[in-house]
Amino acid sequence: VSDNQREAGTIVLDPTHASFSPQEGVNDLGATHFIGIGGAGMSVLAEMLHEQGVEVDGSDREPSAKTDRLQGIGITVEFGQRAENVEGKHTVVFSSAIKSDNPEIVAAYEAGERIVHRSDILALLMNAKRAVTVAGAHGKTTTSSMLAHILTHAGEGNLADPSYAIGGSIQGKDGVTIDGGHAGKGDVLVAEADESDGSFAKYHPEIAIVTNSEADHLDHYGTQENYRAAFVNHVQHAEKSVVMCGDDEGNLAVLRALDPQTAKRTVVYATQDTVSLGDLNGAAFVHIESESESAQSGAEHFTLHMPAGLLGEHERMVPVTLTVPGIHNARNASAAIIAAALLGVDVENAAQAATSFLGAARRFQVRGMVGQVTVVDDYAHHPTEISALLDAARRRYPQSVIRVIFQPHLFSRTMFFASEFAEALAKADDVIVTGIFPAREKQEDYPTISSATIVDEALKLDHTPAEDWIRGVEDMHTAAQMMTMRAHHGDVIFTVGAGDITQMDEVMLHSLQAHRWDCEG
């Protein structure tokens, strides 16, 4: 909290306020407490500080897999947020989900403790590393996970054993889940740069990746123009290079708004050619060529056409095969491979390492099969993500009925993008929209927004009559039971959303087991 905020006698939690100077490091933190330590973005940072010897503890509302893991490595977690939890702390860390009347915030303020946003901690960690940030409305977790995987498996010397701060887990071999936070011994830190609250303006990475700049979080930014302006500001802080997807209209607008010096240091990758893309403002261009997916295999194939001068005197044609499906993952992998090559990894080795990447957790993650009904979980929570997911599903399962249980995430996002959600979900054969996962929001602030908001928009589509393919069911347990009772041999059921809809996978698998005779009929 800044001095002027203390003098005014108020508590203002501003995620865009920079709390540390570039000269400060983690050793200046002292005893550090995380409010809401079990959150995906918070737990990663707490673990990284703990690995670097900082005295860390935290609090959360209730136990979770994240808090279990933190306690398992020696970090104390208190359940329930109380003033006494911050006694004797030097630094207290909050996320944008925490409000100024939180008892731990109030106690820390009254005690004169330093109160900082989670982005301040991430910025502090970046000061000592060659940082690569990954920003965008979607694709952040997969792209940053891919880059961390490539560095781990193809990096040599100081490029090996990277640190990473990823807001999710990574799928490992044999069903093992790898945590998204690691304090490595190498020089590189790979980090998701969350744009939702504007805090990514603090970061000064060596390389900034932007997967897309498609409008989101309009509850914070207000307009699409403000949203894109924040991306322009973010990437102009990159000290060496910017890597951007050119298939996104928002990114092209950001690219054309960059100052000439930054644009010259930018690499654009796209499945479209330069004639289709138009003015690239002097940026280098990497073409994703010959993209295809082997029928029903989930294997994604493409070639990266690297121009002369980017990685040496001569142009390079780099073949890539992925085990994660979908053209959106071809784009994500392209960003990761290009960034790894710019860091100094041999580009062919980087492409080879990408082949063994199994995906971020909850990204097209097959959770099981019963009676030849497959249950798949995915984190998609923006209309474009859902559209890409269902396109990939059609390619992976071309003969299957695709069924979706979608849990909208945030009342505000549902309000802003209801028609886009309806259009994206129309790519499935059967859809149930559950009650909205509120996260930091309250239903009383959005009294007219519910699952019916999306269903009502679907009624307006020039599509098969909506009542034949989509319905709203507030309770997700009821929705799961309904979907399994309708499933047949060969169908694929997707649980989709960024909330707790993932819990329904086990519910459905158990239900399918109990009724497997029906599925096999």
Image (spheres, helix red, strand yellow):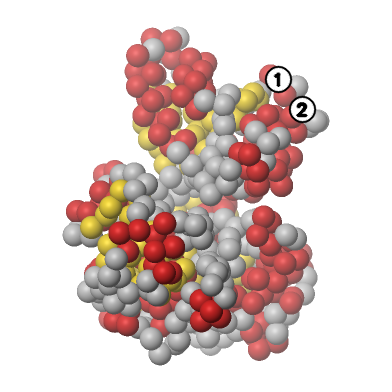
Give the vertical position of 292 relative to 135 (above or below): above
Q: Which mark is residue 1?
A: none
Q: Which mark is residue 467?
A: 1
Secondary structure under the numbered disc 1 in the rendered image: helix
**Residue type, numbered disc 2:** Leu
**Residue type, numbered disc 1:** Glu
Please give left or right for residue 508 compared with residue 291 in the image. Answer: left
Q: Earlier in the sequence, mark 1 or mark 2?
A: 2
Image quadrant where residue 93 sits = bottom left
Image quadrant where residue 380 sits = top right
Residue 198 or residue 169, whichever sits in front: 198
Give the vertical position of 29 relative to 501 (above or below): below
Whole-angstrom CA distance, mark 1 to mark 2, is: 8 Å
Q: Which residue is mark 2?
A: 459
Residue 289 or residue 108, whichever sits in front: 108
Residue 322 in picture, x, y percent from top left:
44, 54
